[in-house]
Image (spheres, rainbow, N blue to C red):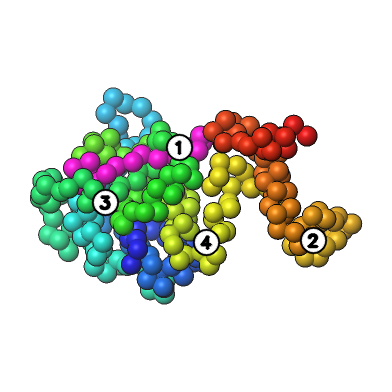
Amino acid sequence: MNMRLDVVTIFPEYLEPLRHALLGKAIERNILSVGVHNLRDWAPGVHQAVDDSPYGGGPGMVMKPQVWGPALDDIAAAGMDGLGGQSLDSAVPHLDNVRHDQKLGLAEESSYAGAVGAVDESDKPLLIVPTPAGEPFTQQMAQEFSHEGHIVFACGRYEGIDQRVVDDAANRYRVREVSIGDYVLIGGEVAVLVIAEAVVRLIPGVLGNRKSHEEDSFSDGLLEGPSYTKPRIWRGLEVPEVLLSGNHALVDRWRRDQALKRTAERRPDLLETVNLTDRDREALEH
Ligand code: SAM
């Protein structure tokens, strides 16, 4: 297995798409294993509340540290093997009704702090906390994360998670707070799907053709240009002649020019970090 993903959420069903398409195939081929965990399994009491009113007042609710803390402790302690009974095998339902505090005998206020012992920084799993206040997610980060062995995602809801959870998690995890864009979602689940999909497709063996991600937008700092398939003429619109020429050097040059032009039109900011050749500059001037 190349990578283990664990997701903690109050809506496990939101993560269902992780079982499908390429990610589902990666699970079946034992490249990836995924555990989806219901945060409420760690919430004590009849109501299993996971949120409380914010200190200092204000609207909305904040997710409770005494629920998140043990959840993240248990998942870190289980490591790449995962917590029993929670694996998201492609064909197996990933929800069960057994609470983790019952399974593991944790009391409401119990804390694992320090129980894992001193851990080498590089051995710690990566904890990704989606938040609009995080560092912007990029293809470069997806590349970086694709080399990880164990990634844990903490999905916030309401006004987010008590900050002490993130601060304390640094004892057991390498923590990254990550934003998928300058807008506010209702919860972190969709952000996790975005990040997981971008990361997993970069693991060797997940995509059939390695070249397909090497040539994607952002891989060389540019947006990818337009793509075409059959038929050659559709509704009176023709495929650019050069693509039918069979001349690979010409096709490559045309693709590079299209990528440069599209990037200049749509995302000129990206060009600032690209190493342009004289030929590239010429293409941009025309
Ligand atoms: N009060 C928070 C703020 O203004 O920064 C917004 C909380 S939002 C309603 C609830 C949860 O959605 C967050 O804890 C986070 O998990 C997720 N979320 C919302 N927007 C996001 C974004 N742009 N990127 C990543 N996660 C996001």
Going from the N terminus, do you reach mark 2 or mark 3 first? 3
Q: Position of residue 157 (x, y in %)?
A: 38, 44
Dots 2 and 3: beta carbons under 8 Å? no
Q: Specify whether residue 262 is in view.
A: no
Q: Residue at x 89, y 57 (%)?
A: 236
Q: Which residue in the protein does label 2 denote?
A: 244
Mark 4 highlights which residue? Answer: 210
What segment is highlighted magenta in the picture?
169-185
Measure the C-alpha gap from mark 4 to mark 1. Answer: 26 Å
Whole-angstrom CA distance, mark 1 to mark 2, is: 39 Å
Q: List the residue tagged with mark 3.
A: 125
Q: Are marks 3 and 4 in contact (CB under 8 Å)?
A: no
Q: Looking at the image, is mark 1 or mark 2 earlier in the sequence? A: 1
Label 2 and label 3: CA atoms lie apart by 48 Å
Q: Residue furthest top?
A: 56
SS under mark 3? loop
Q: Residue at x 87, y 58 (%)?
A: 235
**Helix, strand or loop at mark 4:** helix
Which residue in the structure is indicated by mark 1? 136
Indicate the quadrant containing the N terminus: top left, top right, bottom left or bottom right.
Answer: bottom left
User: How far is disc 3 from disc 4 in space, using C-alphas?
Assistant: 26 Å
Q: How far apart are marks 4 and 2 (CA)?
A: 24 Å
